[in-house]
Amino acid sequence: MKKIMLFEGDIETQGYFSRQLVEGFAALGHETFMYDLSSPYVSTEKFFRFFEKGNTVLVNFNFHGMSGEEYFLDENDRSMWDALDIPSYNIVVDHPMYYHHFLEKVPKNYHHVSIDRNHDKYMQRFFTQIRRMPYLPLAGTKLNPNKSNVPIEYRKYDVMMVGNYCAPQTFEKFITRIDDEYTAFYYGIIDDLLAHPDRTVEDVVEAHLLDELGEVPEDELKKALAAVTFIDLYVRYTTRGQAVQELVDGGVKVHVFGDGWEMVPCKHPENLIVMSNLDSVGCLKKLCQTKISLNVMPWFKDGAHDRIFNTMLNGAVCLTDSSVYLDSILHDGTDCSIYSLAQMKKLPEIAGALLANPGKMQSIADEGYQLALAGHTWAHRAKQLHEWIENE
């Protein structure tokens, strides 16, 4: 049975995911080690006591340990993973367009894990030299696995949203940085994405480039996509803000937990209750106290988000937009409530109908819980990773 190293001490959510995987791996019989990135030299010393040549693998998120950290490089700038011949399984929770600079210099025994099937297609197209593992969606955590969820009727919040908000105007400096022609080009892409929210950023960018230039060499397209991540962020935060704005202006009180929400433009700010930012456990605690949890997918068009499964496992109704993958596992009105990004004006009506029918909400919450419990916990993801690692 392989020994498995994971990371904590940097991005809080990814450290939390890693700790959930540790529990899953331990249940399967793996010995694990959590490397604390906030204390690298102490952790490195502990790691070498844990390390067993030929029997140790790395499971990480978003290139932790592969981002040029000096304590993972030897005097010849060779990575520790190459020097010790440690296979790595890197779960990338954002679009790969954000990580071209890391993808160009991955370790030799590197395995790329995508959380969206479109991300996997992107890797297959632009990074053919990199070994890809099958698609692995994100998962959820039940805060109190040995306790029953609080019934809907006794929950404190009607609707809540967990996550940060950033005003789209923040990214205008990247849109307008060259000249008026480029500005119009970028806004044309943004308008197209917002008008057709089922399309991916890479597809729309490519379509606009082809329309503009007639032909784009593959290498040039690859460079262009790495340079327009601000478009992904712009449309992501636009839709996230609009979903909350539609609800509060439609008379629905929404508690938001995260930074930046005071920047959302709305006509009825009295319905927007801005709370403090929370860590992963804090978010789960609030999910245990809400009736409806709003999710806006971060432009994953063929994947899932942990907010969906966290919501279900902690007994709330998940109100979410969908994706190709979610359409294959979720059932609107049975185990979740689905809205369309193209018709967000219907959100107050959808939420209002749910809140007016506690029995229906309880039924949806119960079905959602069973769905997530049956296949979408981090223990399930640990089992899949275990099979890949042991069959390597």
Image (cartoon, grey):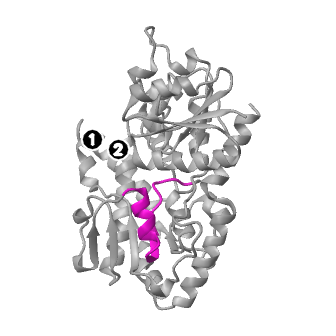
- Which residue is at the far top? 76
Amino acid at dot 2? Phe
| Residue denoted by label 2 | 230
Circle 2 Cα neighbour tier, 10 Å, few/some/many (<14 / 14–19 / ≥20): some
Residue flagged by tag 1: what amino acid is it?
Answer: Phe
Residue 118 appears in the rendering: yes
137 part of magenta stretch = no
Q: Nearer the viewer, residue 123 or 61?
A: 61
Q: Could you say which is closer to the camera, residue 178 or residue 144?
A: 144
Q: Secondary structure at mark 2?
A: helix
Residue 54, how many percent across, how many down? 68, 21
Quarter of the figure that contains the N terminus: top right
Q: Residue at x 33, y 50 (%)?
A: 187
Mark 1 falls on what kind of element? helix
Magenta highlight range: 279-301
| Res 48 label | none
Using the numbered discs, state the Cα–Cα distance from disc 1 to disc 2 in whole angstroms.
Answer: 7 Å
Q: Residue at x 41, y 21 (%)?
A: 71
Residue beneath disc 1: 174
Q: Is residue 296 magenta?
A: yes
Residue 236 falls in which quadrant of the image?
bottom left
Looking at marks 1 and 2 on the same chain, the residue that comes earlier in the sequence is marked by 1
Residue 344 lies left or right of residue 361; in this view the side is left
Residue 93 spot, x, y in % from top left: 50, 45
Q: Is residue 261 left or right of residue 27?
A: left
The percent coordinates of residue 373 (x first, y second) are: 65, 65
Asked if the residue under mark 2 is in contact with the one under mark 1, i.e. CB atoms within 8 Å, the reply is yes
